[in-house]
């Protein structure tokens, strides 16, 4: 929310420097994100309030004129301008005027380009100054004409003193609906600084027939609309709003439109009550000959209306509508209808000020994908006592600035009056929660400054009546929070716990999850986080040529933010492949992993299983692009397998095995299933070319794995068995054997390790050969075997015996033979 200081000062005196005020507000829970100073760069000695004394025609150009401007100097200055809103014969127009040497924004350039104004000749006529547009001052992007100031603007005053301002950009959390207005912020400032709050007190001065005889108001669903107030204003003249109002709206971030619309927006920003103006002459009665009617009711399923943005919308039976005798005219709390909008031809107005249930407005806004300033306020829960004040304030302004004739009285339907909870507060509770003792008088003063009613009911007990604008306060702890905010959290003393700390327990699952991240980052991977929602079309790309995913097998969102994220994911693979494609287009290499939950429906259960999964994706060359490094081969199945083996080893997961896998997502012959002790832990391999193409991945190998992280964590060991490093040298022997192609290399390695015993320290496959010297259907596997004893140097005879034992085991178990 943008809060102009000049507007704020109308309701409370600002006694602190702006930076200190911003800090106090932030510490009180109203975070000031930015302090914007409007016009702080305007040169006080070169940019002034000026008055056009005369406008003469340019002798050499039909579209240019010569404006003679008084700006407080001894002599006026004549300048050449092409502004369309300055015409020959004009005089008395107040303008923003700059003399030579002033720094302004180039109105003809894109963006905010600063230039220095220099004297010169324009079509033969000297011009040493400039009448300025809003863009040249940085006020807006408008460069169609010069900025016209009010008639009472003091000539010769530095423009920074007249139009300069400071705006606080405040981020408000959803529970601070009471502060979502200028007066709401003023109440907080008054409480924080001890100043008096000055709230607007408008008076309804009506003439003619009372409002209640001109329109009927009926609330059919008071659970969604506890209050509806209508005011009648006739014979309004639609036109521009006054300059000061336009200026305040612009500073607050809203675009001025016309006096009626601007007044409704102004009152909403001023006191926090959204308003809507209907063209009274377009509202229909319930029956011919009767008064126009307003009926607040739930929509009928399938009912339709075109909103002010020109979109035809369909409603369900949980949405609240404002209707007249003929049908819908507005979506309650969200947006008005096109048929009853105020136009330049409007003369009579029905002004709506209402209170709607915040959940109803929030749901309707989300379901229709339609947001507005009103919906943002109603969706947080507003004060039900505000509508009469908002209606009277807006009617008063329309009488002044739209020449409207206000009907006496308001039509106020209030079937569900607001409750005012009374909370008993013991000052000892304040000390218990805040850690500082405050006298009851100080507590009472703080709460009263925020609008609470406080009565001393006992020696120290306070009976606190909660005002209707504080719908977030219902417990004694809420009152203590208010005391703490205003007293200042920075003023609370620092104290240590008097008791011993409770026993700490380790969350082993989180520790092992973090260890997984650390290991993968150590392998050169980067972590990504993607949405937990996806869509069926994205999932279907994982199964080219296969049947479409069954929507009944997925958890669907009732109100998705977009159709791209309308189901809860059951795999991380599709989002990983999409991220790989996006990353590769930028970096030419991507090594990514994600740890996230998937959502698997359970039969007969409302909530799904949410196990953790680990997904790894690799694409690009094995080595990074760098000077002096040759381009290497692309990352492939074996790079991914090495990462998985490293992860399992460092997590202490023993005895992993791999078996061939047939999967529509992965390429045949380059896909495997991971098992530990017979338990499946996931799949990995190279992505099938059709899947690769579906995800716009490059025509190169792409490796993908999805593992069951819950299973890995359950098998992981936090204990490490340490062994002393042998002081004696190791002996390395190579062993090449010929086996059937159907025998996995992992099985050969398993037999070697079992036969080698404890003296076999390491066995590494370093060569796989198929060729003329190898019989058909056979393959040659060569292993480097390392032998080492902890207490002696092994002799050739000892190594030979172990090597022989390994060869015999391979022959007997796998039918292997030594390669000559």
Image: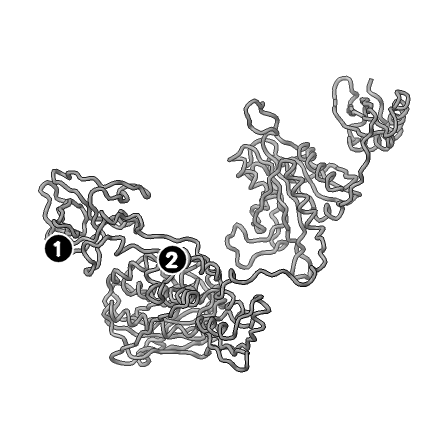
Instruction: Name the residue furthest left.
Output: 59
Q: Which residue is mark 2?
A: 17
Figure check: 439 above or below 551: below
Q: Nearer the viewer, residue 308 or 720?
A: 720
| Quadrant for the C terminus in the image | top right
Rendering coords of residue 463 (x, y %)? 52, 79
- In this view, the residue in front, 80 or 488, is 488
Q: Toward the viewer: 542 or 2? A: 2
SS under mark 1: loop
Dot label at residue 654: none
Q: Residue at x 53, y 71 (%)?
A: 438
Q: Is label 2 in a helix, a strand or a loop? A: loop
Q: Is residue 411 visible?
A: yes
x and y percentages locating residue 740 in the rendered image = 80, 27
Please state if 214 lies on the left or on the right of 429 as rendered: left
- The mark total stands at 2
* Residue 24 x %, y %: 45, 60
Among numbered discs 2 and 1, the one appearing first in the sequence:
2
Q: Is residue 244 left or right of residue 548?
A: left
The image quarter in which residue 226 lies: bottom left
Left or right placement of residue 119 versus residue 285 in this view: left
Is the C-beta separation of discs 2 and 1 under 8 Å? Answer: no
Q: Quadrant of the rendered structure where residue 161 is?
A: bottom left
How packed is label 1: few (under 14 Cα within 10 Å), some, or many (20 or more)? some
For the point 49% across and 68% down, which residue is it? 317
Is residue 272 visible in the rendered image? The answer is: no
Name the quarter where the N terminus is drawn: bottom left
Residues under labels 2 and 1: Cα distance? 41 Å
| Residue 91, disc | 1
**Residue 530 x/y as whole percent:** 57, 47
């Amino acid at each position: 929310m943008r809060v102009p200081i000049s507007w704020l000062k109308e309701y409370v005196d600002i006694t602190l420097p702006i930076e200190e005020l911003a800090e106090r507000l932030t510490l009180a829970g109203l975070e000031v994100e930015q302090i914007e100073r409007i016009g702080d760069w305007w040169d006080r000695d070169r940019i002034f309030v000026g008055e056009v004394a005369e406008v003469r025609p340019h002798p050499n150009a039909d579209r240019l004129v010569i404006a003679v401007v008084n700006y407080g100097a001894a002599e006026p200055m004549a300048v050449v301008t092409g502004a369309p809103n300055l015409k020959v014969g004009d005089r008395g127009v107040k303008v923003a005027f700059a003399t030579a040497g002033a720094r302004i924004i180039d109105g003809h350039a894109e963006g905010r380009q600063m230039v220095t104004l220099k004297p010169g000749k324009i079509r033969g006529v000297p011009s040493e100054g400039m009448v300025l547009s809003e863009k040249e001052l940085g006020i807006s992007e408008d460069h169609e004409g010069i900025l016209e100031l009010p008639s009472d603007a003091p000539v010769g005053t530095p423009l920074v003193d007249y139009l300069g301002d400071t705006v606080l950009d405040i981020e408000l959390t959803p529970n601070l609906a009471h502060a979502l207005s200028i007066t709401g912020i003023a109440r907080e400032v008054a409480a924080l600084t001890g100043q008096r709050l000055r709230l607007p007190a408008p008076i309804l001065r009506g003439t003619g027939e009372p409002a209640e005889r001109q329109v009927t108001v009926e609330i059919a669903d008071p659970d969604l609309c506890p209050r509806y107030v209508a005011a009648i204003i006739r014979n309004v003249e639609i036109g521009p709003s006054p300059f000061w109002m336009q200026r305040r709206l612009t500073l607050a971030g809203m675009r001025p439109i016309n006096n009626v619309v601007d007044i409704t927006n102004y009152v909403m920003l001023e006191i926090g009550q959204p308003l809507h103006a209907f063209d009274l002459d377009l509202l229909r009665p319930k029956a011919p000959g009767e008064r126009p009617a307003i009926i607040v009711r739930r929509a009928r399923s399938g009912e339709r209306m075109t909103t002010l943005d020109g979109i035809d919308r369909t409603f369900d039976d949980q949405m609240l509508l404002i209707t007249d005798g003929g049908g819908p005219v507005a979506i309650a709390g969200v947006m008005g209808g096109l048929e009853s909008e105020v136009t330049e031809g409007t003369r009579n107005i029905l002004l709506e000020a209402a209170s709607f249930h915040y959940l109803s407005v929030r749901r309707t806004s989300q379901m229709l994908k339609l947001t507005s300033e009103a919906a943002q306020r109603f969706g947080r829960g507003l004060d039900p006592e505000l509508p009469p004040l908002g209606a009277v304030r807006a009617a008063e302004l329309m009488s002044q600035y739209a020449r409207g004739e206000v009907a006496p009285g308001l039509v106020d339907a209030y079937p569900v009056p607001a409750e005012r909870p009374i909370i008993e507060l013991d000052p000892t509770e304040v000390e218990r929660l805040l850690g500082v003792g405050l006298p009851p008088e100080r507590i009472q003063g703080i709460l009263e400054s925020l609008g609470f009613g406080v009565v001393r009911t006992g020696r120290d007990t306070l009976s606190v009546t909660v005002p209707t604008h504080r719908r977030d306060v219902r417990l004694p702890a809420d009152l203590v929070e208010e005391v703490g905010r205003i007293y200042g959290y920075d003023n609370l003393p620092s104290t240590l716990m008097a008791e011993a700390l409770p026993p700490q327990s380790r969350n082993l699952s989180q520790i092992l999850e973090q260890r997984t991240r650390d290991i993968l980052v150590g392998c050169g991977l980067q972590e990504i986080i993607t949405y937990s929602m996806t869509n069926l079309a994205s999932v279907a790309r994982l199964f080219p040529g296969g049947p479409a995913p069954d929507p009944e097998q997925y958890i669907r969102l009732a109100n998705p933010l977009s159709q791209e994220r309308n189901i809860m994911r059951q795999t991380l693979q599709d989002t990983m492949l999409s991220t790989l494609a996006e990353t590769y287009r930028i970096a030419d290499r991507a090594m990514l992993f994600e740890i996230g939950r998937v959502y698997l429906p359970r039969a007969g259960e409302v909530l799904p299983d949410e196990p953790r999964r680990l997904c790894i994706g690799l694409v690009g060359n094995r080595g990074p692009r760098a000077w002096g490094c040759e381009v290497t081969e692309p990352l492939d199945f074996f790079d991914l397998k090495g990462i998985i083996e490293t992860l399992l080893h460092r997590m202490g997961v023993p005895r992993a095995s791999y078996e061939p896998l047939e999967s529509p997502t992965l390429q045949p012959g380059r896909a495997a299933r991971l098992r530990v002790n017979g338990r499946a832990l996931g799949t990995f391999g190279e992505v099938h070319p059709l899947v690769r193409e579906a995800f716009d991945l490059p025509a190169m190998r792409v490796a993908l794995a999805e593992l069951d992280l819950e299973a890995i964590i359950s098998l992981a060991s936090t204990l490490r068995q340490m062994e002393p490093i042998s002081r004696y040298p190791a002996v390395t022997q190579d062993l090449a054997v010929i086996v059937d192609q159907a025998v996995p290399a992992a099985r050969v390695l398993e037999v070697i390790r079992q036969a080698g015993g404890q003296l076999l320290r390491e066995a590494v496959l370093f060569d796989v050969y198929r060729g003329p010297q190898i019989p058909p259907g056979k393959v040659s596997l060569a292993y480097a075997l390392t032998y080492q004893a902890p207490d002696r140097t092994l002799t050739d005879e000892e190594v030979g015996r172990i090597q022989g034992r390994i060869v015999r085991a391979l022959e007997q178990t796998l039918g292997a033979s030594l390669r000559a």
